[in-house]
Structure formats: structure tokens, C-alpha cells
Amino acid sequence: MVPFTYEKAASEVQATVAGSRGGRFIAGGATLVDLMREGIEQPRWLVDINALPLHEIRVTPQGLVIGALARMSDVAAHPSVLAEYPVISEALLEGASPQLRNMASIGGNLLQRTRCPYFRDVGADCNKRLPGSGCSAIAGVNRMHAIFGTSSYCIAAHPSDLAVALVTLDASVRVRGPAGERMLAIEDLYCLPEDTPDIEHNLLAGELIVSVDVPASRHARHSHYLKVRDRASYAFALVSAAIALEIDAGTIRTARIAAGGVGTKPWRFHAAEATLIGEPPSSEAWRHAANCAAEGARPYSGNGFKVELLRRTLSRALDTTGAIA
Amino acid sequence: MSAVSVGQALTRVDGREKVTGQARYAAEFELPHCAHAVLVQSSISRGRIVHIDVTEAERFPGVLAVISYRNAPRLPYREHRGSVDPAVGERLHVMQDDVIRFFGQFVAIVVAETLEQAEHAATRVNRHICARAE
């Protein structure tokens, strides 16, 4: 670890000014401390933002506003989240471990970095960590890697479960920085690797996520998260599915389908969603949507199993959600 | 071990301390005049150390020694002979030669007055190892 300055921000202005001058924000530290100890990230200036008043979880008839510093465990246990946005609660509870969930912030969860073992090994070539050095995963061990959104520069999967749940609910992040406040849809927060895998999101220097805003909806109430992985806890997804459905008088009015573990960013399946609109819920409808979702997947030597696993995970998650909608 | 305890859900004496972060592990006990050692590991899985330059690490404040195969004492290893299968293979003779046999093999030890000094100096040794993969 290289020596660094540590500063506790007493105000948002202090934080964003420091951020715009090169300071790195730290909240729960569940991503950053690991990466610093492994030499993957070497910030010279840490800005501790934990004292900022961004912990609140606010529920209104219009929607949910989750403070960026709210802890995963607090959001997951919130009665309104459980009742009106269950996919969020489920996604949070299936991530990390109880101890990590008590430490980790919502904002940090969204900005966490990939688990790709080559990214996390300073001895390996990695375009994300060191642009231009190559991608060790493409010809290496890539069982956990993506099948959508990849490029010849990077195939690393995005690790956040919460982000996948949020893309099904048309959530946005509220961001504040030296230039003022703006909203970014979750889908627009993240970048595809293309030829710059070191650029993962569209936040500008000094911009701080202050909250995640989720609009209230009928499909948010009938939502579900299913995570398939090697262990029952403390493991990242092989494939995960977030589903939200609105079914009225026996017809699907709204469908949202997204998956984790398969995309270089949380992956939403608009075409698959379209196959369901206006249809009655049925096993055939779910299977058809799942098959549609898997089209265009680009597997690598070690993760071909994810294509069929995606179909089955989506089918099952749709079936479960359909039963509660 | 009696048959009665096998398969039973027994309370661990240190369970609560461990899950609440109260448990103190060996490295967390402060003893007076205790030096700390940090190990430097190979980032290749097979090959030979061509060069280790420890001058930067040795000059770092608090560092007492940097040990590698170049200056480690010759240790009195005897050839290992398994009683069941004599072809079982030789165990690792630590710091006795320039050969790297596996990823993560220890190739140097940095000894310093504090753990932080040892850790930081270890990164300075890491930068100055040249190994040839074979």
C-alpha cells in the first residue's frame, strides 16, 4: 500500500471539492480497502464521507429515495422496501455476507469493481487495471465472466446484485458535484468496456452519488431476485435474474427482465420483455422470453454453460414472479 | 471424540467474538520488542529467480533484515522419505535455492520493527525481483 492522506469530509462541498482535486471517496470501504491492500488501487488521498447526512431511506407515494450512505442491511430490512420493492431487498440479502452488509453502503455497492481474478492480480495482464497490457481472461480461466457486452479488450462481469435489481425498476442515481446536481438512469451510469475498460462509469471528477431514486409502480411490488451461484452465501453470481411484472386481468401489462453475472454491466433484456406484453402468463411465455433473452450471447471457453443457465434462471424467476403478481 | 458430539450443533466458545469482530488473532497481540516479518511471494508458477535487489527495502525505516536464498542460513533438511510411497516427492526447502516451484512460493522475508514497515518494505522488494519463467 502506498502512503496516503486521510481526510474526514464534514460537508458535501468539502467532499466534492476534494473529489474534483483527486481525492477518492471511501464509505464502508468494502471494495476500496481490499483493492488498496492488493495494490490494485493506489489512491494518495482518501476522503471519508461517512459523516455526510446521506443515510436516510425515504418512502413517499411517488417512490423510494435511498440515501447513498444507507447500509445494505438497513435497506434490505426496511419494511417499505420489503413490501413495495421486494427485488431490492432480495438482491441485497443475496449479496456479500451479514458482516459485509452491515458495513457496505448503497453507493459503494453500485460502484464496486469486478471480481475478475486477473484484474485483482497485479502480476497478470489486464486492460482494466493497466490499459494496453492485454486481457488475460479471454484465453484464460473465464468461468465467471460475461457473455454480453464484452469486447476484445475486456470480458469482466459486473458484480453488483443491487444494480441488476435497480435496472428493472427504472431507478436513477442522484449525483452532486462541483457543477451541480443531475440524475443518471442506472442503465446510463455504467459504461461498456469497448476499448476503454478502465472507464467503468459516467461520473465526473468530484461527483458524489447522494441517493438512489426508485419510482413507485405496480410492477415494483411484484418483483423478485434469483441468484444462482456455487455457494449459498458469500459468493458472486454465476447467473442472477431480476424480474418485475404487472399482470392485470390475466394479461401481462408490464415486464422487466434483467440479469447479473452475464453482462459487463447489469443487463436488461428489452426484446424478451416485449414478447410478454399483452400475453397471458404461462410456462410457455416464460420459456419463450428466456430463449429470446439468451439470443446474441457470446460465450467464451469457460462460460458456455451460462447461456443455458441464463435461460433456466430467467424461466424460473419469471415463473416465481408470475405467481406473486 | 465421542459419538454423541458428532453431528451435534455445539456452541463455539469463540463464536460470538469471531462474528462480532471482537476476537483477537495472533497478529493483533502487541508484545514489547517484537519484530514483524512479512513474506514476499512469487508471481510466476515455475522458473528461477534471476535477480533480487533488496537495497531499497533494506534502507527503509525500521527494517532489520531482508532474507532470501542469497543470505538465508543453510537449513539441515534431510531428504524426505515417505514410509508408504517412497516416490511421494520432496517437500519445499524454504529459501535454499533460486528455483520457483509454484505460484505464491515465498521468495523473501522482510523483518521490521512494525508490521506496517515490514509490509511496505515488502512491496519494495517485490518491485526488484526478476524471475525467468520456465
Image (cartoon, rainbow, N blue to C red):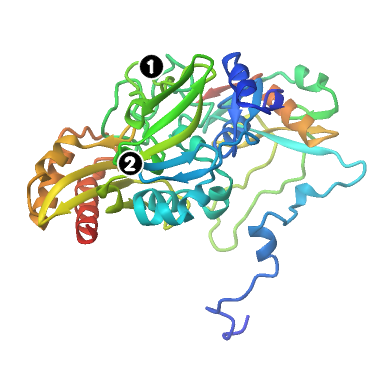
> Which picture quadrant has residue B125?
top right
Q: Residue at x 27, y 41 (%)?
A: A258
Callout 1 crowding tier (Cα within 10 Å): few <14, some 14–19, many ≥20: some
Q: Is residue B129 above or below residue A256?
A: above
Q: Position of residue A146 (x, y in %)?
A: 31, 35
In the drawing, does residue B64 fall left or right of residue A297?
A: right
Lower sequence index among marks 2 and 1: 1
* Chain under numbered label 1: A
Q: Residue at x 42, y 53 (%)?
A: A80
Q: Residue at x 28, y 28 (%)?
A: A149
Residue behind mark 2: A260
Q: Secondary structure at mark 1?
A: loop
Q: A320 or A287, which lies in front?
A: A320
Q: Quadrant of the C terminus of chain A?
A: bottom left
Q: Is residue B20 above or below residue B33?
A: below
In the drawing, does residue A52 fall left or right of residue A231?
A: right
Q: A28 or A245, which lies in front?
A: A245
Residue behind mark 1: A196
Callout 2 crowding tier (Cα within 10 Å): few <14, some 14–19, many ≥20: many
Identity, as a three-letter code, of the amino acid under mark 2: Gly
Q: Is residue A55 visible?
A: yes
Q: B78 or B104, which lies in front?
A: B104
Q: Residue at x 65, y 25 (%)?
A: A46
Q: Secondary structure at mark 2?
A: strand
Q: A132 or A288, which lies in front?
A: A288
Q: Position of residue A310 (x, y in %)?
A: 23, 46
Identity, as a three-letter code, of the amino acid under mark 1: Thr
Q: Position of residue A4 (x, y in %)?
A: 70, 23
Of all residues, the one furthest to the front in this rendering is A61
Q: Position of residue A114 (x, y in %)?
A: 44, 33
Q: Is residue A166 above or below residue A154?
A: below
> Which picture quadrant has residue A131?
top left
